[in-house]
Image: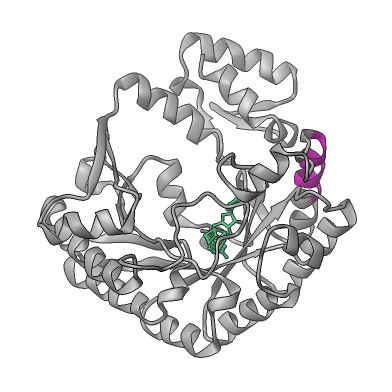
């Protein structure tokens, strides 16, 4: 593909939340002092103009507004989308997603987003079990995420995704089954399910370190993953990436597919990462420093690297194997190709034509398989 034929995605990071969840180490802040959504909005509009000047005329395949809690800025999300449309133009049938916290959506906002061009909504549900939501410091009641998904459908969204987390301390197998059943009742066409990661710098990380909370164990996580995969498949949601299940090929998140396939994307916002033509860079993390740089006409980038051929080969294996379609045998080094035979014998991968694909068992050991095949 020539550079301009590579699909272009725009990611916009809204770095604010109403409160911090104790498990989350995303680059997000509760608004205070100089760090306010209005200052962020102005700076993000400046970075969109900067991106257009750098990239030239390229139309955008996917827009993904993430966070943080994008829905905290309400209909200002439309101002961001309009700026992308005005600066670049969207391809026909572009996918336009916003993440949303169920607490900060209303039927009116969802209708406005749909009318303004958003095509997909991704709601952070996490769990349907009250004690699990409490351990996660989630403010919404168990039913709120399902209600928000139904409201999104009523507002005209054909594509509604729910994020779930499994393996929270205190969660039982039955709790996880209840969560999956509740999520399915909302009839999403996409579900992402993530194993809880205990991040060191978070309140949950401190609670686990001090022994106040037990750490999730691998066997439990593997059992919950296998259960999710089986139940979701039974209900017509098939895996297409390690943590992602979709009802149809059209329901797959094309923006995320762009990350896994190393397409081009420009990340707008504090701490956002970009990748264009084999060059990767990342922005300063604090919203105040980000706004100051852009107001002074400077790039908000904090660092940059040019990927070597070796980096790219490693990424091809790491990212390609995450997808159901796997990766071409020819993408592996001779040592990696030799490891395929061992992994087939361990029933962790299978060869389908010239594609190396993870088996269900292999998905439970994906990190280890990726290490073997990246040799
Ligand atoms: C930016 S948040 C989604 C939108 C919104 N802020 C919310 O939480 O409802 C992206 C997703 O990452 C997942 N996530 C965040 N921290 C995690 C952790 N420590 N372990 C596993 N999943 C995590 C959650 O499922 C969350 O919905
Ligand atoms: S999980 Fe979502 S709502 Fe909670 S702190 Fe992280 S980004 Fe904010």
How was this image coloured? one colour
Residue 39 in view, yes or no: yes
Q: Is 316 in the magenta?
A: no
Relative placement, left or right, of 224 versus 10 is: right
Relative placement, left or right, of 155 versus 59 is: right
Q: Is 226 in the magenta?
A: yes
Determine the residue positioned at 62% across, 76% down.
149
Quadrant holding the N terminus: top left
Provide residue 343's location: percent of width, then percent of height.
67, 19
Q: Is residue 153 above or below residue 331?
A: below
The image quarter containing residue 93 is bottom left
Q: Quadrant of ligand 2?
A: bottom right
Q: Nearer the viewer, residue 126 or 254?
A: 126
Q: What predominant SS class does the magenta segment belong to?
A: helix
Provide residue 29's location: percent of width, then percent of height.
44, 60
Q: Is residue 288 above or below residue 214?
A: below
Q: Nearer the viewer, residue 205 or 334?
A: 205
Query: Farthest residue in the right direction?
Result: 174
Determine the residue positioned at 75% across, 19% down.
346
Q: Is residue 196 above or below residue 11?
A: above
Relative placement, left or right, of 174 versus 363 is: right
Residue 58 in view, yes or no: no
The image quarter containing residue 35 is bottom left
Determine the residue positioned at 78% across, 45% down.
212
Q: How many marks?
A: 0
Span shown in magenta: 219-227
Provide residue 107's location: percent of width, then percent of height.
54, 88
Relative placement, left or right, of 10 versus 362 is: left
Q: Is residue 100 above or below residue 295?
A: below
Provide residue 293's location: percent of width, then percent of height.
18, 54
Determine the residue positioned at 77% across, 67% down.
128
The image quarter containing residue 154 is bottom right
């Amino acid at each position: 593909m020539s550079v301009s034929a590579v699909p272009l995605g725009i990611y916009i990071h809204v770095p604010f939340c109403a409160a911090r969840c104790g498990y989350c180490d995303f680059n997000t802040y509760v608004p205070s002092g100089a760090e306010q959504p209005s200052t962020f909005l102005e700076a993000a509009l400046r970075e969109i103009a900067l991106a257009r000047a750098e990239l030239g005329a390229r139309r955008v395949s996917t827009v993904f507004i993430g966070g943080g809690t994008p829905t905290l800025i309400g209909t200002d999300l439309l101002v961001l989308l309009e700026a992308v449309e005005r600066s670049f133009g969207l391809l026909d049938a572009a996918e336009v997603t916003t993440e949303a916290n169920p607490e900060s959506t209303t039927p009116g906002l969802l209708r406005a987003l749909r009318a303004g061009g958003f095509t997909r909504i991704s709601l952070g549900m996490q769990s349907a079990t009250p004690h699990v939501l409490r351990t996660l410091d989630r403010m919404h009641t168990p039913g709120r995420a399902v209600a928000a998904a139904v409201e999104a459908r009523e507002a005209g969204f054909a594509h509604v995704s729910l994020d779930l987390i499994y393996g929270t301390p205190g969660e039982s197998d039955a709790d996880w089954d209840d969560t999956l059943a509740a999520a399915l009742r909302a009839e999403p066409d996409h579900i992402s399910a993530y194993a809880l990661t205990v991040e060191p710098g978070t309140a949950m990380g401190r609670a686990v370190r001090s022994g106040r909370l037990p750490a999730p164990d691998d066997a439990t996580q593997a059992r919950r993953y296998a259960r999710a995969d089986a139940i979701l498949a039974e209900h017509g949601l098939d895996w297409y990436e390690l943590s992602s299940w979709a009802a149809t090929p059209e329901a797959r998140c094309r923006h995320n597919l762009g990350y896994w396939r190393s397409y081009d994307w420009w990340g707008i916002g504090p701490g956002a990462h970009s990748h264009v033509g084999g060059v990767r860079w990342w922005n300063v993390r604090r919203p105040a420093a980000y706004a100051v740089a852009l107001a002074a006409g400077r790039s908000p980038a904090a660092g940059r690297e040019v990927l070597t051929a070796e980096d790219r080969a490693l990424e091809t294996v790491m990212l390609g194997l995450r997808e159901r379609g796997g990766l071409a045998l020819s993408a592996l080094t001779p040592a990696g190709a030799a490891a395929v035979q061992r992994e087939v014998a361990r029933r962790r991968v299978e060869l389908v034509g010239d594609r190396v694909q993870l088996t269900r068992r292999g998905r439970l050991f994906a990190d280890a398989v990726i290490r073997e095949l990246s040799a």
